Image: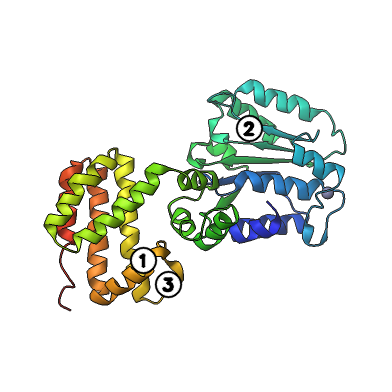
Amino acid sequence: MNWQDFEQEQPFAAKMLKSSIEKNRVAHAYLYEGERGTGKRSASTLVAASLFCDNLQSNFIPCGDCVNCKRIKNGNHPDIHIVEPDGLSIKIEQIRSLRTEFSKSGVESKKKLYIIIDAEKMTIPAANSLLKFLEEPNVETTAILVTEQPQRILPTILSRCQTVSFKAIPVEVFTKKLKEAGINNTKAPLLATITNHLQEALALDGDDWFAQARKIVLNLYEVQKKGALYAMTSLQDEWIHHFKEKAQIDLGLNLLLLIYKDILYIQLGKEERLVFPDWREKFAADALQTSSRRLSEQMSAILEAKRKLNANMNPHLLMEQLVLNLQGGPSCV
Ligand SMILES: [Zn+2]
């Protein structure tokens, strides 16, 4: 990742970190928090490169070519340490060895940086040991704690860190990234909507179950327009055999919801937001036959079904109720 990508994906986090580097006011400790796939780890390496590069380009962009940049890229810079969970947790020995390592003066310079990945996985003794380390005054050391679950980090540690929040990557930015990674134009918008994680999107892209799921949901949408009987048949023949586990049913409902959203986007003239671009013509015809009020009723019915699913209602019953609620043309306005 480079600063340009970082600024596109995480405008707030990037701006904050860049300005602290520019002003030479890098904090003693940071907490990078945000969901999986939001680029926290790549950002920590980028910041490290910007701090250590011998030949910073304009705009504080690391050159990528000097000894320090190369070592960071290869993960073997002597003054940068990355601590990751050893099995399920980060153990006190790992933090102790980090402290021992850092008590020696810097190999290359006095500057040192460490990154703790999945910091919430520190055991209590490990966290307490880190806390002592954070309390030791050491101006040239920077700590970056990375986590998806900041609520599981000791408040005493949190209070010593400057929090940098990583948000979900904007859908249009992530769609572009997926296309660059080789996902085709038809599939990229949908995948970017249901996940924020590149590897997950690539896996779904090649997944037969997901391809089939998309087809079944679109088919259910099509047949339910013809009447309740058709919809029930489609449920019995396809849906219930494919969507079995709770997470699968939830995904199916999300896909269904996105269909109604697409039709609403067409009504609103925001066709660039469609996640089923290959269905544009069909949806455009449907958009003329319905009202935005009816569409929002249908979307509410799907959200209600998601809530019932969460409350462990029988999934067959829940789906039957849903297709009945989706029935019918536009309500009289
Ligand atoms: Zn460099």
Name the secondary structure under disc 3: helix
Front-lying residue, 274 or 57: 274
Between 113 and 306, the one nearer to me in the picture: 306
> Counting residues from the N terminus, which is met first, the one under dot 2 or under dot 3?
2
At 83% across and 58% down in the image, what residue appears? 57
Mark found first going from the N terminus, 2 or 1: 2
Q: Nearer the viewer, mark 2 or mark 3?
A: 3
Mark 1 and ligand 1: say if the CB distance to the nearest ligand atom is below 8 Å: no
Whether residue 121 is visible, yes or no, is: yes
Q: Which residue is mark 2?
A: 131
The type of residue carrying mark 1 is Asp
Which amino acid type corresponds to the residue marked 3 in the rendered image?
A: Glu
Label 1 sits on residue: 262
| Residue position for label 3 | 271
Would residue 10 be visible to someone looking at this image? Answer: no
x and y, in percent, of residue 156 in the image:
57, 37
Mark 1 surroundings: few (<14), some (14-19) or many (≥20) residues within 10 A: many
Instruction: Bin the neighbour count of mark 2 within 10 Å (Cα to Cα): few under 14, some 14-19, many 20 and up.
Output: some
